[in-house]
Amino acid sequence: MPGAVFSPRDPTLEDYWRGIILLGRNVASYKFALAKALLELRPVSGQLVKLDELALPFARHVAAHLKLGRQGTSASSQFLEACRRFNEDGDTSRLVEQTVRLGFNNVIDAFHVIGPGDIPRRFFHDVRQGEGGIRITDEFTALMEGQQAANLPREVESRWRRSKRPGSSGCRGHCWRSTMTRQPRRCLPWSGACAASQSPAAVAP
């Protein structure tokens, strides 16, 4: 969402994560696949996740969504072609090789970007240069230990599917009620970003 910025309120880790899912840069929907892969792998603080370890769950999520229809805005990308081919032949070795080479070119850089810049809390550090992967932060471990951790995969999936609908481009300042929690609504700590309120807030657009 262009121009989204943080307000002076103190956001929770769940708020930061949901801000990424709701408002972060959408690089052919790859942010959703990366989020789901991280939630699936559940790496711990300080752990180095190599790209070849991250590649298969990441690409499988993209490939699964290709079966559902339009995938982001880069329908002709080489990486998406590799995922389509995987859907036809099931060759995981080739999928991993092509994902490591092509799949992470933009999404790791863009994952923590909302509006004009990076959010102040990070769930991983980019250490591709020198270490060949990402290194997990304390924030991600705390997120996984939080009371809302079990809801996060469903929230990512819900937002991903919504993003494929024609004309869907985000919250546009409207409050969304959670279809899973039925909790009262409140705004997230970004201008124009709204989500259903729980403690922490739950988002199920």
Image (cartoon, rainbow, N blue to C red):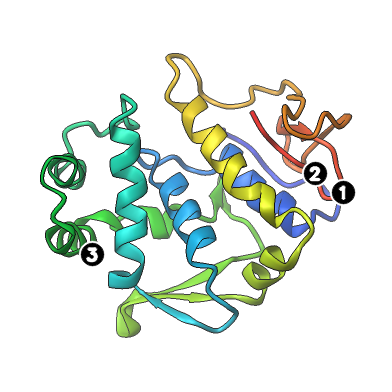
Check disc 2: other Cα within 10 Å, few if <14, some if 14-19, many if 20+.
many
Q: Can you say whether 95 is above or below 82 in the image?
A: below
Residue at 60% from the left image edge and 66% from the top image edge: 122
Which numbered marker is on residue 199? Answer: 1
Q: Earlier in the sequence, mark 1 or mark 3?
A: 3
Q: Is there CB contact under 8 Å for labels 2 and 3? A: no
Where residue 14 appears, x then y in whole percent? 72, 53
Report helix, strand or loop for mark 2. Answer: loop
Please give the residue where the numbered disc 3 appears in the rendered image: 100
* Image quadrant containing the C terminus: top right
Residue 47 visible in image: yes
Marks 1/3: CA–CA distance: 37 Å
Where residue 99 appears, x then y in whole percent? 22, 58
Q: Is residue 138 left or right of residue 186?
A: left
Q: Is there CB contact under 8 Å for labels 1 and 3? A: no
Residue at 50% from the left image edge and 82% from the top image edge: 47
Amino acid at pointer 2: Ala
Q: In this view, does 109 lie to the left or right of 198?
A: left
State the residue in front, 63 or 51.
63
Marks 1/2: CA–CA distance: 5 Å
Amino acid at pointer 3: Val
Please give the residue where the numbered disc 2 appears in the rendered image: 201
